[in-house]
Image (tube, helix red, strand yellow):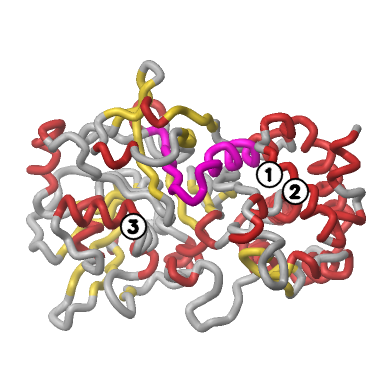
Amino acid sequence: MGESRVLPPSHLEVFVQKVLVGTLHRDQYGRTWFLPDEPWSAGGQRPRLGLSFLRDPSPRTGSSGIPVWFDNLLPEAGSPLRRRICQQTGIRETNTLALLRELGLDLPGAVEVRGPDVGDIEARGSDVAPGKLRFSLAGLQLKLSMVLSKDRFALPARGESGHWIVKIPGDSLPDLPQIEHVTMAWARSMGFVVPRTMVVPIDVLQGLEPDFLEGPKQVLAVERFDRLPGGGRVHQEDFAQVLEVEAVHKYADARGRRTSYDLLARQVADACGSDARCDFMDRVAFILASGNGDAHLKNWSFQWGDDPRPSLSPVYDQVATVSWPSIDGWDLVGGARLALALGQTRRAKDVDKVRLKTFCKRAGSAGEVDRMLSTLERARERWRAVESEAPPSMRQALVEHWRRVPILRHVGGLDAATKR
C-alpha cells in the first residue's frame, strides 16, 4: 500500500485489503464525493468494494454528508456508540466525514479510510487514552468491539482490532442477551453458519467508563466473522450498502416504498447464484419461525473474497423479537410484523401458504414452496434442542407466535413440538 500521499483534511483515501480504491473529497460547495482510483477501476475493481460500484462505477455523492455507502459504515445516527464517540472526540454527530476519518482504521469489513494524519495516529498507538472508542459498528444498540484474553474482554489498543462484538442491553430489555443467544443457537442447530456467541457477566468487561457497567448484569459476546487470526480482515457490505439506502430507511427505501424479502432474494440470485438464493429463502423461513421482526437491510450482508462474486455472510443479529409482546409482538395493534414484506405483507398473521407461494414466485423461484415448508418443519423440530435454554417469556411468546401465524399452524405449531 505504501505511505498515504499528503492530503488536505477534506480528502481521505479509501483502501480495501490495503489496496487504494478511491478518495473521498469535499468540494467547495460542501458536498463529499467518492472518486474511484483509476488504476483500480482499470483493473476490474479488484479487490471489490461493493456491488453498487460494479453496477455504476462513476463518482458519487450523498444528498447530505458523505455518500450513502460510506455513511453505512458508521454507527447509526442517534445510537449510543455514535453519541459516545462524538462526546469523546468533540465531533458533531452530523459531521460524517470527520467521523469516518476518526474511525477509518477500524471499520466493518476490510475497508480502511485514511486521512493526512494517519501516520501520527498510528505512531501514538497504545498512548491513546484508556476507554477511548476508535472503532465503528452498525446498529442502534450499544456495541463494543473488544479483544478476549483469559476470560476477560477489553477495548483494543490503537492499531489493534477487536475480534468480538459485545452487546450491552438497555434497562428496558435486560433479557436481550439470553434471547439473542438462544435464537442464534437455534439457527446454528438448523445448519446455518452462525458465529460463536456467549452470555457473560458485565463485570468481565475491562477498561470502560463506570457508566457502561450500570444496568443489566449480563451482556452478549459475538465472535466477529469479518476479523481473522493474525490481523486479517474479511470484506463485507450490508444490504443497505448494496442498495445504497440510508440506515434510517433500513425498513424501506428512500422513496418510501417498502423493500421486500423477494426483492432481496432476486438480488442474492443475481449477485451469488441460485444456490445462494435458496439459502437466503431458508433464512427468511427461519426469521418467520423464530418471530424475528427486525431482520432489516442492515442485518443481511455479502462477503467478498478471491472469487469475483460475493457470498452470503454468516447468519447474525437473530433475535426472537416477539418475546416482547408489547414492543414487537402480538400485543401490538395488528399483531407481530416483519421488518420487510414477505408475499406482499408485513403482518405475520397474514402469512399463509398463498403468501408463501407469492413470495417464492416474486423471488424468481416458484418451485421452492415445499423447501420453505420443510425449513419451517425443521425449525419446529430443532426448537427442542434449545428450548431449555430459553427464558420463560421467550418460550411462551413463541408458542403464541406459532398459534397466530397461519403457515406455522400448518406445519404443526410449536406447542406440539414442545410437548414431545
For disc 3, the neighbor class at 10 Å (few under 14, some 14 to 19, many from 20) is: many
Q: Does residue 42 appear anywhere in the picture?
A: no
Q: Is residue 175 above or below residue 403?
A: above
The residue at 55%/53% (across/down) is: 309
The residue at 50%/43% (across/down) is: 174
The residue at 29%/45% (across/down) is: 135
Q: CA distance from mark 1 to mark 3?
A: 31 Å
**Could you say which disc has been placed on residue 394 in the image?**
1
Quarter holding the C terminus?
Answer: top right
Q: CA distance from mark 3 to mark 2?
A: 33 Å
Precedes in sequence: disc 1 or disc 3: 3
**Could you say which disc has been placed on residue 378 in the image?**
none
Could you tell whether 382 is left or right of 195 in the image?
right
**Magenta residue check for 176:** yes
Q: Amino acid at mark 1?
A: Met
Q: Nearer the viewer, residue 113 or 350?
A: 350
Q: Label 3, secondary structure: give it.
A: loop
Q: Which residue is mark 3?
A: 74
Q: Amino acid at mark 3?
A: Leu
Q: List x then y, in percent, for residue 313.
A: 56, 46
Q: CA distance from mark 1 to mark 2?
A: 6 Å
Q: Label 2, secondary structure: give it.
A: helix
Q: List x then y, in percent, for residue 395.
A: 73, 42
Q: Which residue is mark 2?
A: 398
Could you tell whether 189 is left or right of 257 in the image?
right
Answer yes or no: do the residues labelled 1 and 2 have beta carbons within 8 Å?
Answer: yes
Quarter holding the N terminus?
Answer: top left
Q: Which residues are magenta?
A: 163-184
